[in-house]
Image (cartoon, rainbow, N blue to C red):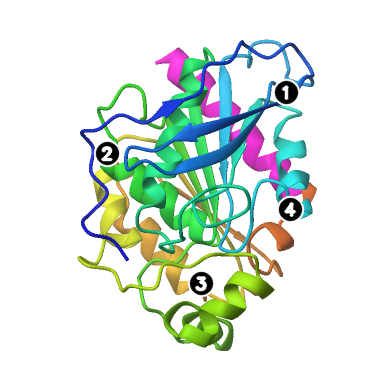
Amino acid sequence: MSSGPAGQKARSSVQPLTRARPGVRRRATLRTQDGIAIDAAYDPGPGSPAGHGDVAIVLAHGFTGDLARPHVRRIAGVFAQRAAVITFSFRGHGASGGHSTVGDREVLDLAAAVEWARSLGHAHVVTVGFSMGGSVVLRHAASHRGRTEARTDAVVAVSAPARWFYRGTAPMRRLHWVVTRPTGRVVGRFGLRTRIHPHEWDPVPLSPVESVPLIGATPLLVVHGTRDPYFPVDHPRALVAAAPEGAELWLEEGMGHAEHAASDGLAGRIAAWATASWTSATAD
């Protein structure tokens, strides 16, 4: 689905805008390094506790989601009680341009959103991804280390796969049909409102479990439900086993998959972890 791996040399950009007033959500169009227009929104987090104003959470949604979907807005709303929040629609989703590459070049979309967070003055940026977005935040953390504008300071992967091409569950077999078959892509476009790139990956991007060892000292939290119908618990366990020392695993009893299954309570705990990662970083 790509003419090459997601590179690190070119710069992404954002349309100029003024810093948002407290309580006012702003929209912007971001431009990725490969020229895709990405629809994004910024919530300054009016309920942020004192001392956490420098923290921004960048929320990376799952496949077929977008920033306007109710389940994404619900999670963002909980995050905004503790920190500023940037939501965006991956390429091929919502009002963003391009076609979905199902986790490959989406790394560039996330990089543009992180750069926007930093341009708004946030010193500490935490990326939180769900399902496909979970794979993207892991790959982004590995590939953008050392890039001041696009780096992440902490990363949370929720309901993420560990490896590509997994077909061990019925939902994943259906998803592969949607992505790989012409008829499936028609269903994706008109039924799921997701425009999917028609070509296979070339080359195959580094998988999440191959990416995790490369994130170095970046704080990592892996969250997964024990009743996830897409990816069984060997996926999160493999991710944490491959990670540098200090990675955390939260296995949520009875939880299903991604944003739809994440309770407000869980979202609040994730936001608390994100802001605590800033406190730890400043203490160091």
C-alpha separation, residue under disc 4 versus residue under disc 1: 19 Å
Name the residue beneath numbered marker 3.
233
- Mark 4 crowdedness (10 Å alpha carbons): few <14, some 14-19, many ≥20: few
For the N terminus, the image quarter is bottom left
C-alpha separation, residue under disc 3 versus residue under disc 2: 23 Å
C-alpha separation, residue under disc 3 versus residue under disc 4: 27 Å
Inspect the magenta stretch and tell me whether residue 274 lies in it: yes
Name the residue beneath numbered marker 1.
45
Q: Left or right: 32 with respect to 83?
A: left
Span of residues in magenta: 265-284
Could you say where residue 114 lies in the image, as x and y percent from the top left? Answer: 46, 31
- Mark 1 crowdedness (10 Å alpha carbons): few <14, some 14-19, many ≥20: many
The residue located at (51%, 23%) in the rendering is 15
Helix, strand or loop status at disc 4: loop
Dividing the picture into quarters, in which one does residue 167 lie?
A: bottom left
Could you say where residue 227 lies in the image, as x and y percent from the top left? Answer: 65, 75
Q: Left or right: 278 with respect to 19?
A: left
Mark 1 belongs to which amino acid?
Gly
Q: Which mark is residue 69?
A: 4
Name the residue beneath numbered marker 2.
216
| Sequence-first disc among 3 and 4 | 4
Q: Left or right: 109 with respect to 263?
A: left
| Sequence-first disc among 1 and 2 | 1
Could you say where residue 43 lies in the image, as x and y percent from the top left? Answer: 70, 26
C-alpha separation, residue under disc 1 versus residue under disc 2: 29 Å
Which SS type dominates the magenta stretch?
helix
The residue located at (64%, 58%) in the rendering is 65
Q: Is residue 44 above or below residue 70?
A: above
Q: Are marks 4 and 1 in contact (CB under 8 Å)?
A: no
Q: Is residue 1 above or below residue 77?
A: below
C-alpha separation, residue under disc 2 versus residue under disc 4: 33 Å
Mark 2 belongs to which amino acid?
Gly
